[in-house]
Image: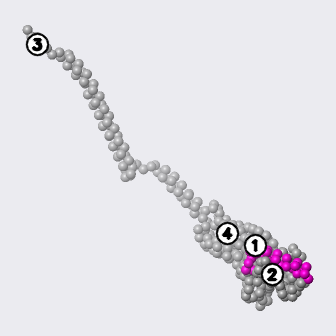
Amino acid sequence: MFNKKTHDNSTKRQRVEKLSPRTKNYSYYESRLAGGNKERVRTDDLRQNERTGLVKDRPWYLKLINVVIIFLVVAFIIDDLVLSTSPRLIINGDTNTTKLFSVSQAKYQAAATKIFDQSISARSKITINSNAIAIKLETEFPELSSVVISLPLIGHQPTITVVPAQPAVIVTPQGQPDSFLVATNGRVLASNNSKWPKNTLPKIIDETGINYIVGRTTMSPSDISFIQLVSTQFMAKNLSITSIKLPAQSRELDVYVTGEPYFIQFNLEDNSDALQQIGTYFATKQYLINNQITPAQYINAMVVGRVYYK
């Protein structure tokens, strides 16, 4: 009645055949992963060997090239630090001062070269003392206002720029037999020189007791400027100045005008109002002329806006 079921082996085979490709793909994927891990491990090992020096060094000729390059760079730096003992000298400014003292550029050049020759520290950009060299030149040549030494960034020859001082006034100190030529910066340039431009420079009688020595700064530049301004303003008014005095123990400037029985007192302490003080005197002078008044001793213009006369 009942028929016994028989299993179909063909169906089983089909299922197995269908499953078998999956198994094959899975095995291939695993093998690829395993291979990738091996490559990564190999790369890590290579880097580790490079760090520890197990990998073969670069070729010898590359090392030689690097050594040669380093040597050339060091040699260039050392050579560039060496300075020549024959500096280049430049005179910057009015050369009338140097002519006044009969000093030529060749004389400055020879003195600078001598200083460089005698100084071992001046042979190198690292050890050179530029300030010391400048002071030596300024001491040897008082007529120089400044000396500047500059070193080349690339090269061996230093440059020395000298600036001649500008003569400003001639001072005769009380108690000293000599007269002194003083520059605009207050430095004493020389004493008793027949070549001075005596007719064009203001003449000062200094009663303050200051000891004037060539090469020393004895007056302030602001006082020099005040005196020069007085001189030029009086010349513009056709007023001839006989003499100018610096009284003792005061910051006063006394100006004596040719043909007048009095002198004018100015205040050196107030240099900013120099023009106003001078203008105050000129206005007072005109007022006195209009009113036929002649002071016998002085006109005090030391306070701006107020004038006293006696």
Which comes before the other along the chain, label 2 or label 4? 4
Residue closer to the observer: 230 or 213? 230
Asked if 42 appears above or below 261 in the picture, the reply is: above
| The stretch drawn in magenta includes residue 299 | no
* Residue 254 horizontal side relative to residue 9, left or right: right
Residue designated by label 4: 149
Residue designated by label 2: 307
Amino acid type shown at disc 1: Pro
Residue 218: quarter of image: bottom right
Residue closer to the observer: 277 or 244? 277
Magenta region, mostly helix, strand or loop? helix
How dense is the environment of label 3, judged by Cα within 10 Å: few (below 14), some, or many (20 and up)? Answer: few
Residue designated by label 3: 4
User: Magenta stretch?
Assistant: 268-292
Which-is-in-front pick, marks 3 and 1? 3
Which comes before the other along the chain, label 2 or label 1? 1
* Helix, strand or loop for disc 4: strand
